[in-house]
Amino acid sequence: TNIARANRRADRRSRDLIDAVTSRYTSTQ
């Protein structure tokens, strides 16, 4: 269960990173 929680946290972090990159990319265009 602890590993699942860590995976969920990592997934959320990667999702936030993707959102930041996409927002910057769209704002640049």
Image: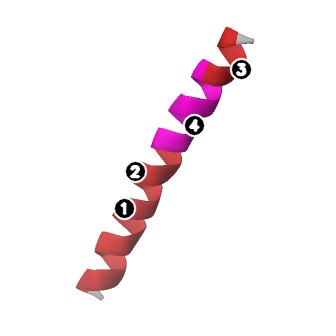
Q: Quadrant of the N terminus?
A: bottom left
Residues rendered magenta in the picture = 17-24
Residue that mark 1 sits on: 10
**Mark 2 closeness class: few <14, some 14–19, many ≥20 residues within 10 Å:** few
- Mark 4 and mark 3 residues within 8 Å of each other at the beta carbon: no
Q: Secondary structure at mark 1?
A: helix
Residue 10 x, y percent position in the rendering: 36, 61
- Check the image and name the residue furthest to the left: 2
What residue appears at the point 57 percent right and 37 percent down from the top-left corner? 19
- The type of residue carrying mark 1 is Ala
Q: Secondary structure at mark 2?
A: helix
Q: Is residue 12 left or right of residue 5?
A: right
**Mark 4 closeness class: few <14, some 14–19, many ≥20 residues within 10 Å:** few
Residue that mark 3 sits on: 26
What residue appears at the point 37 percent right and 73 percent down from the top-left corner? 7
Q: Is residue 29 left or right of residue 16?
A: right
| Vertical placement of residue 23 versus 16, above or below | above
Q: Give yes or no for residue 23 being in the magenta stretch.
A: yes
Query: First in sequence: mark 3 or mark 2?
Result: 2
- Mark 1 and mark 2 residues within 8 Å of each other at the beta carbon: yes
